[in-house]
Image (spheres, helix red, strand yellow):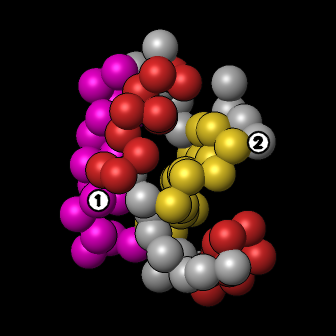
């Protein structure tokens, strides 16, 4: 299973998602949109929006963590 998360450092929802993945021992790759503006372009191309966290689990895209928590946790179970 491949997990990618697009973030910015000041995003609390991003930080909650990363903490959850660590607690669940789910390896993920973080793409910091603040450090690399190209990642923000990737988010826009994926979602049509520039919202973080944008989370990709395999080929499924989630915009936001808290509002998608149930679906994300079920997918990772």
Q: Quadrant of the N terminus?
A: top right
Q: Helix, strand, or loop for circle 1?
A: helix
Q: In this view, does 12 lie above or below 37?
A: above
Whether residue 33 is visible here, answered yes or no, is yes
Residues under labels 1 and 2: Cα distance?
Answer: 21 Å
For the record, the magenta segment spans: 8-24
Residue topped by disc 1:
13
Q: Mark 1 vs mark 2: which is more N-terminal?
A: 1
Picture coordinates of residue 65 (x, y %)? 38, 51
Of 8 and 70, nearer the camera is: 70
Picture coordinates of residue 71 (x, y %)? 47, 33
Q: Helix, strand, or loop for circle 2?
A: loop
Instruction: Identify which residue is drawn at 29% across, 70% down.
Output: 11
Instruction: Identify which residue is drawn at 35% across, 58% down.
Output: 14
Instruction: Identify which residue is drawn at 26% across, 74% down.
Output: 10
Whether residue 42 is visible here, answered yes or no, is no
In the rendered structure, does residue 49 fall within the stretch colored magenta? no
Residue topped by disc 2:
59
Picture coordinates of residue 48 (x, y %)? 69, 79
Of 56 and 28, nearer the camera is: 56
Q: Which residue lies furthest to the top in this view?
A: 77
Q: In this view, does 1 lie above or below 3?
A: above
Instruction: Identify which residue is drawn at 42% across, 59% down.
Output: 64
């Amino acid at each position: 299973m491949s997990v990618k998360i697009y973030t910015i450092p000041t995003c609390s929802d991003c930080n909650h998602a990363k903490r959850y993945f660590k607690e669940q021992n789910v390896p993920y790759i973080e793409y910091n949109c603040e450090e690399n503006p190209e990642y923000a372009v990737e988010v826009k191309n994926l979602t049509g929006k520039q919202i973080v966290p944008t989370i990709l689990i395999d080929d499924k895209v989630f915009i936001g963590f808290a509002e998608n928590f149930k679906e994300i946790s079920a997918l990772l179970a």
